[in-house]
Image (cartoon, rainbow, N blue to C red):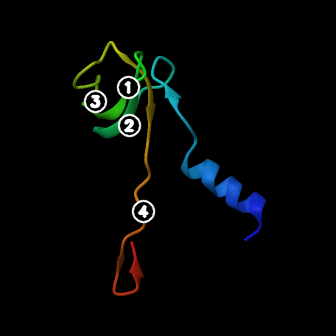
Amino acid sequence: MEIQSKISTYKQLNPGWIPYESIKPLIYGKYIVCRKDGKIHWETWNGTGWAYNNNEIRYWLVIPEPPIKFDNITI
């Protein structure tokens, strides 16, 4: 795989921080967030807002799950 292809794949998997004021997560789950004080940690999105620190969150990030292999079967 050539370097440009690797960079393109990386950007697709890791698009970067998403501004919370512009785009909200769509599904319930845990996300990496960055608060306005610069602290980065896991936070739960409950479908309508962040479970804690809702007014402090400025950016969020989705970490894609790695493929899981069972007996040479990729899920």
Q: Quadrant of residue 47?
A: top left
Who comes first in sequence, dot 1 or dot 3? Answer: 1
Who comes first in sequence, dot 2 or dot 4? Answer: 2
The Cα atoms of the two marked residues, 1 and 3, are separated by 22 Å
Q: Amino acid at mark 1?
A: Lys
Assess disc 3: are there few (<14), some (14-19) or many (≥20) residues with their C-alpha within 10 Å of its C-alpha.
Answer: few
Q: Quadrant of the N terminus?
A: bottom right
Who comes first in sequence, dot 1 or dot 2? Answer: 2
Compared to residue 36, the image places residue 45 above or below, namely below
| Label 4 close to label 3 by CB (< 8 Å) | no
| Label 1 close to label 3 by CB (< 8 Å) | no
Relative to 1, 57 lies left or right: left
Q: How far across and how far down the image is residue 17, in percent?
A: 52, 32
* Element at label 1: loop
Front tag of 1 and 2: 1
Q: Amino acid at mark 4?
A: Pro
Residue picked out by circle 4 = 66
Q: Quadrant of residue 50?
A: top left
Compared to residue 8, the image places residue 15 above or below, namely above
